[in-house]
Amino acid sequence: MKLIGPFKQIITLDHLDLRGKLSDEQLIIIENGGILIKDEKIEAVGDFEDLKAQNPSVFVEAIDSEQIVLPAFVDCHTHICFGGNRANDFAMRNAGKSYLEIAEAGGGIWSSVQHTRNASEEDLLNLLLERINKLLSLGITTIEIKSGYGLNVESELKMLRVIKKAQALTKATLVPTCLSAHLKPRDFEGSSEVYLEYILNDILPIVKAEDLAHRVDIFIEKSAFLPDESKAFLLKAKEMGFKITVHADQFTPGSSRIAVEVGALSADHLEATSADDIQFLASSDTVAVALPGASVGLGEPFTPARKILDANGILAIASDWNPGSAPMGNLITQASILATFQKLSTAEILAGLTFRAAKALDLCDRGILAKGKKADFVVFLTDNFQNIMYQQGELRPSKVFVNGEMLTI
Ligand code: NIG
Ligand code: FE
């Protein structure tokens, strides 16, 4: 056992509802607190001096000055396994060029597919580890990572195997997702329905046999896969034992409904969700995932996070870090921007970055500082937790702990 502290403030995020509105008055803040660790898990959270008195012989890992601590963040939607760079897409888009013009100039998702297909496993692994380390340095210790830049058996499996290798080399928890249904690749001969069959018959059985991912995602959109074929695909993937998540309502409404109907863990994007669909989604157990990094990257509206919370939905916030629509990768900056535009309380933002995001990954062992939870937490050198959002990502963690051990960040 060891006791870590004393911290100026512990923001436990305990005893908050999984769904709906939250006010900052509901936050439990322990002043001069300590965290007791046993077998990599949290044994107790409370007053530092009390915990010390109750455990007189415990090893104390002292915290040197005014620091606050909260549960480590969870990024429940990323595409950080990729080769190449799409700075030219960004510049062209900002200069007013259309999606088609960008694609004709060699950009778009297809450009990332070619770079990822051409990258060696070793190069892809190194790029991925660099990005994981950046997220760890921001206090994000659980990271979902999608395939979807391979789009054939060989390269989709390469991506997922690289993610598996990365897991052996990092302390972060990586949650892989098979997004072979990101787009029908240009070199696939056959309809999108046939491509979805190919994923079901030729890719997912190997993903399962090699235990490369337990989750399947699809991009439902006019430019990608249509609602009916997507629903049939998701139901079959579910029958194979995969959990489901969906890229939904990014540019056109309607697909979050499919996510709910198939019992998806989460429906992500939702920038174009209609009022009716917000109600439908918010009454379900499917987590609504806002991706402000994509809104900022594309100049598109923000996910209606306020309305989702007011309708009692479960709202998580993720980075969508990818080379095209969301190149920034700083989830804390993005969450702070979302709060400003959508009028979210600090409690709503912190919940969306921690236990509500963990729910989107079906992980109930983290995101809260309480007895029995995974001892992942993030420490900031500041005397007030409000400074984290106030400084819009510029206040970096001073320490990050995984399983009760301090990382070198
Ligand atoms: O989540 N919307 C589809 N897919 C990604 C973009 C991927 C890319 O542009 O490379 C997204 O924003
Ligand atoms: Fe995405």
Image: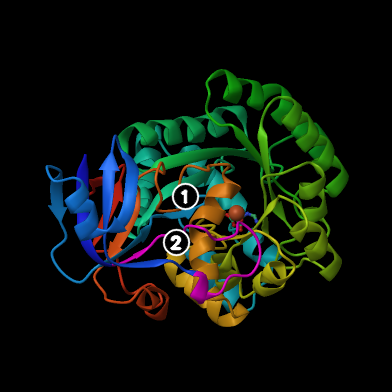
Percent across and percent down for residue 220 are 76, 51
| Residue to which mark 1 is pinned | 80
First in sequence: mark 1 or mark 2? Answer: 1
Q: At 75% from the left edge and 42% from the top edge, which residue is drawn?
A: 263
| Residue to which mark 2 is pinned | 329
Asked which secondary structure carries label 1, the reply is loop
Q: Main secondary structure of the magenta part?
A: loop
Q: Quadrant of residue 188?
A: top right
In the picture, which quadrant includes the N terminus? top left
Left or right? Give the position of 297 relative to 161: right
- Outermost residue on the top side: it is 209
Query: Is residue 86 something that shows in the picture?
Result: no
Q: At 47% from the left edge and 49% from the top edge, which residue is drawn?
A: 80
The part of the chain drawn in magenta is: 9-26
Percent across and percent down for residue 396 are 30, 68
Percent across and percent down for residue 375 are 34, 46
Asked whether 51 or 356 is in front, the reply is: 51
| Residue 22 painted magenta | yes
Asked whether 230 or 312 is in front, the reply is: 312
| Residue 314 painted magenta | no
Query: Is residue 12 something that shows in the picture?
Result: yes
Percent across and percent down for residue 362 are 58, 42
Q: Residues within 10 Å of mark 1 (few under 14, many from 20)?
A: many
Q: What amino acid is found at the position of numbered circle 1 in the picture?
A: Ile
Asked whether 327 or 154 is in front, the reply is: 327
Q: At 74% from the left edge and 65% from the top edge, which residue is drawn?
A: 251
Q: What amino acid is found at the position of numbered circle 2 in the picture?
A: Gly
